[in-house]
Image (cartoon, rainbow, N blue to C red):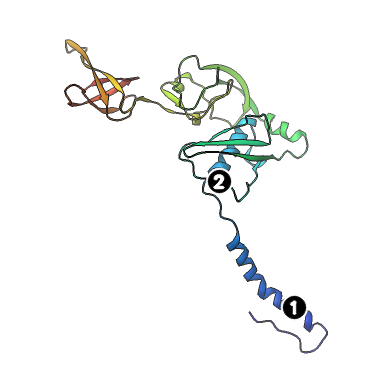
């Protein structure tokens, strides 16, 4: 970069100083970028999850919620499982994030942009509709197989565009929870996954024969793989050592092929 200076005039010194500043600015900016602390690998997922937790809990839109950066010296490892979020001490300005593998726990600060006092109420009440949803009747832990009596129907006011709530009891059948649910929490489709009716290493009651075949026998076999309802899986007879195939028909139950 070349700087042209006036041969005459009283501004020569100022121009020279400005040129020097421009020449030095780029190296300084590059040095700042190089010295900036790296983002912890687990931070993006933690930040996104904490924001979604606040949005779901307080029925807020994304632009109203900010998750404040943590101290750059704190290293957040990537969580191999879903991060669990809660607010155990009733402090709406912070969210606890917990990981089971590897085990860690961090608190992040939350900033809700409400502007004037009425804005938050407007954001949560405008364009709402009454909807029949399923809510938990008790605190339920993540990984629990959904059973009758764990949920009941109730009518609540929700944003008109919200379509993620479970509205049909059949959507709860043969599912398990992906996160902890406090009592009276509306359940959404993303809170559930199809549950494995059979898990590898468990004993399974296998029926062979049945209607139209004139006989029905049952044997116990060891599952060689996990299986969802209706899936074909491999099993092993522990007495004979022979392998067999069967279709999963229920919890630890299958029908031989």
Residue 161, percent across and down?
59, 32
138 relative position to 228: left or right? right
Q: Residue at x 74, y 81 (%)?
A: 16
Nearer to me, 137 or 74: 74
Q: Residue at x 67, y 29 (%)?
A: 90
SS label for mark 1: helix
SS label for mark 2: helix
Earlier in the chain: of badge 2 and badge 1, it is: 1
Residue bearing the label numbered 2: 43
Residue 122 lies in quadrant: top right
Q: Give the position of the C terminus as an image quadrant.
A: top left
Residue 179, percent across and down?
51, 29
Q: Give the position of the N terminus as an image quadrant.
A: bottom right
Nearer to me, 157 or 37: 37
Query: Height in image: 26 above or below 142?
Result: below
178 relative position to 205: left or right? right
Residue 162, percent across and down?
58, 31
């Amino acid at each position: 970069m070349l700087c042209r200076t006036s041969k005459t005039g009283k501004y020569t010194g100022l121009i020279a100083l400005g040129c020097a500043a421009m020449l030095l600015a780029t190296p300084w900016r590059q040095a700042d970028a190089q010295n900036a602390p790296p983002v912890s690998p687990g931070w993006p997922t933690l930040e996104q999850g904490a924001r979604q937790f606040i949005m779901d809990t307080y029925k807020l839109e994304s632009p109203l919620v900010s998750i404040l950066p943590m101290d750059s010296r704190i290293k957040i490892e990537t969580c191999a499982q879903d991060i669990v979020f809660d607010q155990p001490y009733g402090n709406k300005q912070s969210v606890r994030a917990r990981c089971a593998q590897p085990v860690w726990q961090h608190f992040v600060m939350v900033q809700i942009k409400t502007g004037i006092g009425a804005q938050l109420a407007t954001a949560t009440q405008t364009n709402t509709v009454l909807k029949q949803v399923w809510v938990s009747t008790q605190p339920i832990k993540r990984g629990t197989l959904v059973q009758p009596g764990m949920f009941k129907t109730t009518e609540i006011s929700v944003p008109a565009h919200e379509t993620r709530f479970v509205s049909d009891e059949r959507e709860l059948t043969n599912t398990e929870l992906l996160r902890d649910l406090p009592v009276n929490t509306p359940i959404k489709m993303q809170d559930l996954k199809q549950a494995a009716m059979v898990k590898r290493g468990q004993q399974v009651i296998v029926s062979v024969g049945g209607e139209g075949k004139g006989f029905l026998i049952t044997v116990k076999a060891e599952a060689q793989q996990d299986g969802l309802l209706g899936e074909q899986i491999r099993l092993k007879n522990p007495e004979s050592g022979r392998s067999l195939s069967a279709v999963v028909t229920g919890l630890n139950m299958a029908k031989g092929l």
